[in-house]
Each structure stands twice: as structure tokens, then as C-alpha cells.
Image (spheres, helix red, strand yellow):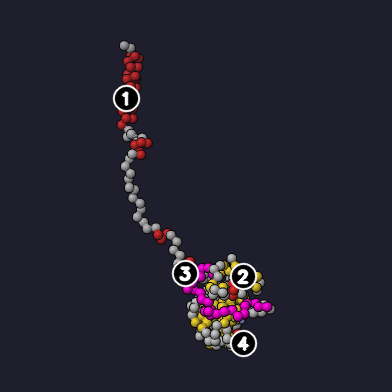
Amino acid sequence: MRKSEIINKQTILLCVLMTLVSCRVQTNLPASPSVEETASLPKQNIPLPCENFKWLLPPPPTVETVHAPRKPITEQLNDRDRNHVGVKDPKRFAESNTEIIDLSLIPEEEYAFPLPGGKVISPYGGRRRHHSGVDIKTKPNDTIVAAFDGIVRMAKPYAAYGNVIVIRHYNGLETIYSHNSKNFVKPGDRVKAGQPIALTGRTGRATTAHLHFETRLNGEHFNPNMVFNFSTCKLHRYCLLCTRKGNNISIRTQ
Ligand SMILES: [Zn+2]
């Protein structure tokens, strides 16, 4: 045998050996499971992190923010607040020319008809549109109550109004109760809806004992019929969309 033939045979043998070793390595590799095998694997319980992530969530809304349409109001009263009926609150329309007062969000216990059992004897406006409120009558010295929660802004005799009370409410409105025979509250007092504040009378310009009741926004009176249904003595369940145009306020229902 020639030397070159021997080398060739050795080379072929080496190649065969390498191939066999290579196959051996391949067969020793861990077999990857087939799809069927994967599906049939027992399910493992992967532990979830035990962290409490509640602090990441926003705080749940409180009853107050859900129900009462509370607005910022000026509670520090100056001389003008204590002595005049039509006074603007600088916090009204402070950020926008539009304010929404959603009467439907006021719960039953946060409003009261100002003279329970009263009947309207003279509407707002009237034939000459000069009447700035609604006249409601029951009997002399009957109990007048606060229509909503708020702070008493004014309580005193005031010209044709006679003994008058003005309450600034947290919903943005003000209400006025006039011709009272007696006032029970004073400026700065906080009152709750339904709390007795005065007795009906005929002080000021009045021919019979009754309650002259006004609703105002930013000092401007508007029809109390937009707030209360005077037939049922209930609060209307809609939104008041209030828009400021110069010194005037226009109010629409929505
Ligand atoms: Zn009147």
C-alpha cells in the first residue's frame, strides 16, 4: 500500500469517527417537547407578587363629592355683605362665565321648602315684572325655614323688605326671606336646610302676613320657580346652566 493511500484511508476513518461523535452529541441534547407534550404538561401555580397596590388607585369618591354640588363661597362677611340684599360673591364666575348648579344632585335632606304648606299669592315678575320674588302665605307667625345649607349673610330690617334674612348657600345660590315678624338668626350663623330662621309677618311694605321669597345668583334675582315647583313644594330635578353676560345673568334649565 502506498503512503498516499494510507493517508486517504486515515482521513476517511477520521471523518467517519467525527460524524459518529457528532451524532452522539446531537442525540445527547435534551429533546424539546412537542406541541402535544407541552399541552399535556401539568399546570404550575405561578405565585403572584404579594404587594398591595391599592395605594396606586385614586381615592374612592366621598358621599359629599358624589351628591352635593358644593362650590366655594365667600364666608368672611364685610359691611356690604351684612347690610345689602343684592351683593355679588367674588367666588361666583371666578374662573368661567358659566356655572352649573345641578339641583338633581341635592339629596332630599339638603333642601326644604321655605314655608311648609304655603300657597303662592303673588308670582315672580307679575304684570309689570317688578316683583323680585314669590309671595307665599300660610298664617301670621308661621315658621320659615332655610331652603338649603349655608351661612347667614344678612339679618336686619331693610326698607320695604322689613325684617329680612339673606342666606348664602354652598350650592352657589342665595335665598332671601322677607317681611318677617321675627328673625332667629344673625350674620355669620351657619344654618342647615329645614332649620327655622324666622316667623312670617308683614314688616316693611306688606299688606298681609306672608313670606316674600327670592332666589339670587351673584346678586341678581331670578324666578324661584326655576328652583322649586311651588305646586308640589319640591325641588326641580334638573341642572341650572348659568351664564354671565356683563352684569346680567342668564339661567337656562338643562
Ligand atoms: Zn313679594
Report helix, strand or loop for mark 4.
loop
Q: Which residue is mark 2?
A: 251
Q: Which residues are magenta?
A: 102-127
How many angstroms separate mark 4 from mark 2 (CA)? Answer: 31 Å
Q: Amino acid at mark 4?
A: Thr
**Distance CA(mark 1)–CA(mark 2):** 95 Å
Type of amino acid under label 3: Glu
Q: Could you tell me how far apart the alpha carbons at marks 1 and 3 are, in whole angstroms?
A: 82 Å
Circles 4 and 1: CB atoms closer than 8 Å: no
Q: Nearer the viewer, mark 1 or mark 2?
A: 2
Q: Residue at x 47, y 69 (%)?
A: 64
Is tag 4's residue or tag 1's residue first in the polypeptide sequence? 1
Residue at the spot of label 1 = 20
From the viewer's perspective, is the residue at label 4 or at label 1 nearer?
4
For this view, does 1 lie left or right of residue 226? left
Asked if residue 13 is positioned above or below residue 40 in the image, the reply reads: above
Q: Where residue 207 is drawn, which disc sits there? A: 4
13 left or right, relative to 133: left
Residue 109, visible in the rendered structure? yes
Q: Amino acid at mark 2?
A: Ile
- Asked whether the residues under the numbered discs 4 and 2 touch, taking CB atoms below 8 Å apart as contact, a structural biologist would say no
